[in-house]
Image (cartoon, rainbow, N blue to C red):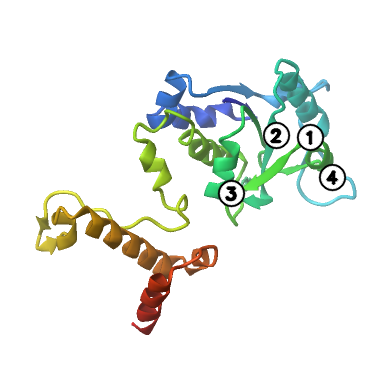
């Protein structure tokens, strides 16, 4: 996968791209990335990337020209048809499903504005996806792009050593993950559930499924609406409701 990131602050990405799984994925050639500072594409004397809003009002608006030209430049040396993702609070809220969808692409371009709005023609002509990482306003799209890229890259083939670990993640199954325990079996009197020490894999699997469902029921009841529950699962939920 190739990722191009349009940002006025590429240095913000350093720590994230040069640590842990993203660094390993890059070193293993699972993805490549380039930063494009769209200030380098301005056609005005003072390299201005923004201007006052037509109609007046507070704040500045990112001009279309530098961003269009930067994206044109990226597209010129590629045969693929990239997805162009605009990071903004008005976008669709990012989910694991969206991460899985983007992970199937060969080429992603991220546009990260900072402090200000985007000229509407960027949205209507240039962008294929508008993505928000949640209902709050950040100082810019960079942190959001890092969140999206992190969750996409970890899904690329070969990036996570244990392929199963991505499949069993919270959200990939539609449920939150079941509780995990490691040694010791008794920590300050707090015991690991017996079933996990039993060696009976069928019982362990059943316990995990039930705990994942219970956790989802208690913390994120909204997620259950997307699932088809078995009669047994409906029965458990009735019991938890009564509790
Ligand atoms: N830029 C500013 N706020 C944002 C958000 N919540 N998600 C993505 N990009 C943003």
Q: Residues within 10 Å of mark 1 (few under 14, many from 20)?
A: some
Picture layout, residue 23 above or below residue 234? above
Pointer 2 or 1: first along the chain: 2
Find residue 209 and report its horizontal and vertical position in percent: 34, 60
Confirm or deny contact between disc 2 and disc 1 (CB under 8 A): yes
Q: Which residue is mark 3?
A: 94
- Mark seen at residue 126: 1
Q: Would you place residue 37 above or below residue 150 in this image? A: above
Which residue occupies the foreground of this view, 30 or 207?
A: 207
CA separation in Å, label 2 and label 1? 7 Å
Q: Is residue 227 left or right of residue 232?
A: right
Going from N to C along the chain, the mark reached first, 3 or 4, is 4
Q: Is residue 57 left or right of residue 90?
A: right
N-terminal-most mark, 1 or 3 = 3
Find out whether the residues at labels 4 and 1 contact each other: C-beta distance under 8 Å. Answer: no
**Res 105 visible:** yes
Locate residue 119, reporting x and y percent.
81, 41
Tag 1 secondary structure: helix
Which residue does the image show at 84% across and 45% down from the upper left? Answer: 53
Residue pointed to by mark 4:
53
Q: Quadrant of the C terminus?
A: bottom left
Estimate the x, y position of residue 44 in percent, counting from the top left. 83, 22
Q: Earlier in the sequence, mark 3 or mark 2?
A: 2
Residue 48 shows in this picture:
no
Quarter occupied by residue 48: top right
CA separation in Å, label 2 and label 4: 24 Å
Name the N-terminal-most of marks 4 and 1.
4
Secondary structure beneath dot 4 equals: loop
State the CA–CA distance, disc 1 to disc 3.
20 Å
Residue for badge 2: 84
Q: Secondary structure at mark 3?
A: loop
> Mark 3 vs ligand 1: CB under 8 Å?
yes
């Amino acid at each position: 996968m190739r990722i191009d990131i349009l940002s006025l602050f590429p240095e913000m990405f350093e720590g994230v791209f040069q640590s842990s799984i993203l660094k390993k994925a890059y070193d293993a050639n699972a993805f490549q990335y380039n930063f494009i500072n769209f200030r380098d594409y301005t056609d005005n004397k003072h390299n201005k990337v923004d201007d006052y809003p037509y109609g007046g009002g507070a704040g500045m608006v990112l001009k279309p020209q530098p961003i269009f030209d930067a994206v044109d430049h990226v597209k010129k040396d590629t045969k693929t048809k990239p997805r162009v993702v605009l990071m903004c609070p008005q976008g669709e809220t990012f989910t694991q499903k969206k991460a899985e969808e983007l992970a199937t692409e060969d080429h992603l371009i991220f546009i990260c504005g900072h402090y200000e709005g985007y000229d509407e023609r960027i949205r209507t002509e240039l962008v294929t996806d508008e993505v928000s990482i949640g209902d709050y306003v950040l100082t810019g799209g960079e942190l959001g792009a890092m969140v999206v890229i992190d969750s996409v890259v970890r899904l690329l083939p070969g990036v996570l050593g244990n392929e199963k670990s991505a499949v069993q993640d919270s959200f990939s199954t539609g449920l939150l993950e079941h509780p995990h325990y490691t040694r010791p079996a008794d920590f300050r009197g707090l015991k690991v559930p017996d079933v996990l020490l039993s060696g009976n894999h069928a019982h362990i699997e059943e316990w995990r499924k039930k705990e994942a469902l219970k956790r989802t029921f208690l913390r994120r009841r909204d997620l259950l609406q997307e699932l088809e529950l078995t009669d047994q699962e409906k029965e458990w939920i009735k019991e938890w409701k009564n509790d």
